Amino acid sequence: MMKLFCIGILCFSAFAACGQPGPAGKQYLGTKTPYPVTRIIRNTPAPKGYQAVFINYVGRHGARFLTKPGSDVLVVNVLALADSNNALTATGRNIKQMARRFEEIEKGNYEN
């Protein structure tokens, strides 16, 4: 029972430590939180005789994969252990399924 309690505390700590307060009281989970808007930028008008047709702007650096396996594998393992001990709620089983899917996506794509 103590082992299960420690696993629960570990899971809670991992999720709580990832929470980052965001703009307007929103909370983002993970280390890839968006930058808050600090000022409004006005668009530069097109030069005379030209008309803007399409602008594709990707702020920051776009999507990326994890650099190495680590916390993603740990979360899946902890949730699988908790599930094997019948210690997950329906929400916990849903999170386990999402974590497994995330792990599948990351596999073979680390450092990309």
Image (cartoon, rainbow, N blue to C red):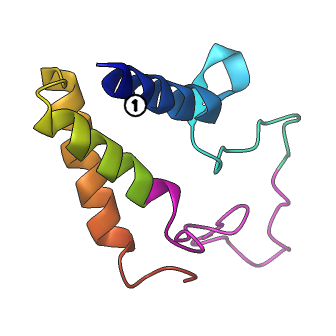
Q: Of residues 104 and 85, which is closer to you in this image?
A: 85
Seen in the picture, residue 75 relative to 68 is either above or below; the reply is above
Seen in the picture, residue 7 relative to 84 is either above or below; the reply is above
Seen in the picture, residue 34 relative to 52 is either above or below; the reply is above
Image: magenta residue range: 43-72
Secondary structure under the numbered disc 1 in the rendered image:
helix
The part of the image, by quadrant, that contains residue 52 is bottom right
Q: Of residues 97 and 2, which is closer to you in this image?
A: 2
Seen in the picture, residue 7 relative to 59 is either above or below; the reply is above
At x 88%, y 35%, the residue is 39
Residue placed farthest to the front in the image? 2
Q: Position of residue 61 (x, y in %)?
A: 69, 69
Q: Position of residue 101 (x, y in %)?
A: 24, 58
Q: Of residues 88 and 34, which is closer to you in this image?
A: 88
| Residue that badge 1 annotates | 7
Residue placed farthest to the top in the image? 25
At x 44%, y 32%, the residue is 11
The answer to whether residue 58 is magenta is: yes
Could you tell me which quadrant the C terminus lies in?
Answer: bottom right
Task: Assign the magenta stretch its main secondary structure.
Answer: loop
At x 66%, y 67%, the residue is 57
Q: Position of residue 71 (x, y in %)?
A: 50, 54
Q: Amino acid at mark 1?
A: Ile
Q: Is residue 10 left or right of residue 92?
A: right
At x 66%, y 44%, the residue is 33
Q: Of residues 39 and 34, which is closer to you in this image?
A: 34
The answer to whether residue 82 is magenta is: no
